[in-house]
Image (spheres, rainbow, N blue to C red):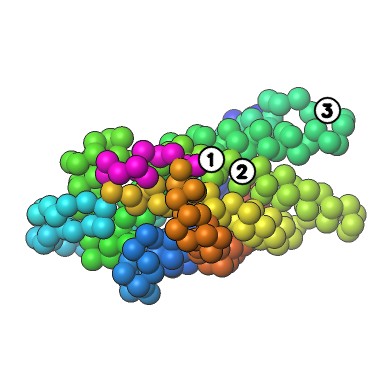
Amino acid sequence: MEPRESWAALAAGGVAGVCVDLILFPLDTVKTRLQSPQGFWKAGGFRGIYAGVPSTAIGSFPNAYDSKLKLSLGEEVTLKVTCPIQLGQNSIISTFPSTAAAFFITYENVKSVLPHGSASYLTPVTHMVAASFGEVVACLIRVPSEVVKQRAQVSPSASTFRILTHTLYHEGIQGLYRGYKSTVLREIPFSLVQFPLWEALKDLWSWKQGHVVDSWQSAVCGAFAGGFAAAVTTPLDVAKTRIMLAKAGSATASGNVLAALGGIWRTQGLSGLFAGVVPRMAAISLGGFIFLGTYEKTRELLL
């Protein structure tokens, strides 16, 4: 893969990440609160689902906080900090672009080094392997942000910085990587479905119309692929959410995905395993449209 192509993948992934993050965060907040063990309303309901994003986008002003932090997952801790960030959604404003960029530069580079045989049945395998590598790398950035973000989503009165400090103080750096395995186990199956399906839909559409798909057509394919992948991997997403929100030291916090799924099944049944499936599908379908369409268009402009 040429250096220029690598930089294009990096930049296009970052631009696509910013677009999705700013537009779709409220749906992600609703989904997380639906999956929270506290229940939707106790986790905040519709309160504060988008607060702080505009100020982060244009440059926040520092605010002093001197209050008690009481999270669902831990003890009370009194902190006094000066922080430009007010809610959990801000924690991913800066990290999601880098996560997306990390994914796509890995995805494109792995695709370029894998053998390109003439057999068409090998093409989906190439996309699956490349997407899996991309997710493993991206999760190194995504998971700490996701831990802080989800804890803030269910504690809307707490600032991101206070939650980050609380996590580091009580759990150390490993607290920020709680749920890494469950996140990877969610993201790899998701990508194994989404990316081969996205590439296959683009190839089919290109064949039908006799030329390569435009960026908007790629976006439509991304919406269908993302929505389908979101639906079938929702139980893994619920397990990941429960692990990240679990009280430190509890059995769920150990990160055993099968145990988490079993516990949800016993207490809430099928509805618990698919909690938040509608906002998850809506967010990822729309996200797939914006993200993959923006990625393709930006990459075209840069190459």
Query: Tag 3's secondary structure?
Result: loop
* Residue at mark 1: 185
* Residue at mark 2: 189
Real-space CA distance between mark 3 and mark 2, rounded to the nearest whole angstrom: 24 Å
Asked whether residue 162 is in view, the answer is yes
Residue at 73% in and 49% down: 197
Q: Mark 2 and mark 1 in contact (Cβ < 8 Å)?
A: yes
Q: Is residue 124 left or right of residue 167?
A: right
| Image position, residue 53 (x, y; %) | 36, 65
Q: Nearer the viewer, mark 3 or mark 2?
A: 2
Disc 1 packing (10 Å; few <14; some 14–19; many ≥20): some
Asked whether residue 10 is in view, the answer is no
Query: Tag 2's secondary structure?
Result: helix
The amino acid type found where label 3 is placed reads Gly
* Residue at mark 3: 117
Magenta extent = 248-258
Residue 203 sits above or below residue 254 on the image: below
Real-space CA distance between mark 1 and mark 2, rounded to the nearest whole angstrom: 7 Å
Disc 2 packing (10 Å; few <14; some 14–19; many ≥20): some
Residue at 33% in and 66% down: 43
